[in-house]
Image (spheres, rainbow, N blue to C red):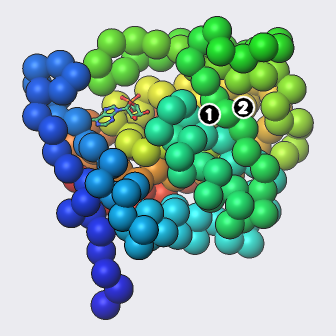
Amino acid sequence: MEHDFRHLIRDVADWPEPGIVFKDITPLLAHPKGLAWAVDRLYEPFVGKGIDLVAGIESRGFIFAVGVARALGAGFIPVRKPGKLPRATVRREYQLEYGSDAVEMHADAAREGQRVLVVDDVLATGGTMAATCELFAKTGADVAGAAVLVELGFLDGAGRVNVPLHSVVIY
Ligand code: AMP
């Protein structure tokens, strides 16, 4: 059986706030085979699915999205926190597991009919992913799927994501 690297995703209790168990992926990122395992498990279900663009959600989504885009022969789109992008943007507010925030991307980042895969490290309440998918709906692009390294299944975030969701590890 192929090696599994999920033990390199470390639980950090009460960070950044009491009651939150933070999934720290930095040991996995630092492990050469662990990093390759993560990127490979994220992109493989989308081979041959006609993905034109891979969107990464700031900031840990960026880490994986570029590798996934490269493997799929697709381009990369940064989905950013408010106020970071220099040209005209589209914006969506959302609730986090801790606090609230918004996501933005360039209004012309994806054209109508292009097939987009959205990538992030962790799906918690699903608010960030759902908001990002809604951003693409505004541009007319087709969100073909969402891929996350970790899904916190007990938070039922998958129920808020209305595109095919691929989760490498579910807790
Ligand atoms: P949510 O919108 O609740 O699904 O939160 C997802 C976003 O918040 C992702 O971009 C994650 O990086 C981050 N996040 C939320 N909860 C956690 C957690 N327990 N551990 C690590 N990252 C988290």
**Identity, as a three-letter code, of the amino acid under mark 2:** Phe
Taking the image as shown, residue 14 lies to the left or right of residue 123, namely left
Provide residue 168's location: percent of width, then percent of height. 40, 61
**Identity, as a three-letter code, of the amino acid under mark 1:** Cys
How far is the residue under mark 1 from the one under mark 2?
Answer: 5 Å
Asked whether the viewer can see residue 130, the reply is no
The quarter of the image holding the N terminus is bottom left
Provide residue 110's location: percent of width, then percent of height. 83, 36
Provide residue 17's location: percent of width, then percent of height. 17, 19
Image point (57%, 41%), residue name: 62
Classed neighbour count for the residue bearing mark 1: other residues with Cα under 10 Å, few (<14), some (14–19), many (≥20): many
Give the residue at mark 2. 136
Question: Pointer 1 and pointer 2: residues touching (CB < 8 Å)?
Answer: yes
Image point (11%, 20%), residue name: 18
Q: Nearer the viewer, residue 34 or 155?
A: 34
Give the residue at mark 1. 133
Tell which quarter ligand 1 is in: top left
Classed neighbour count for the residue bearing mark 2: other residues with Cα under 10 Å, few (<14), some (14–19), many (≥20): many
Callout count: 2
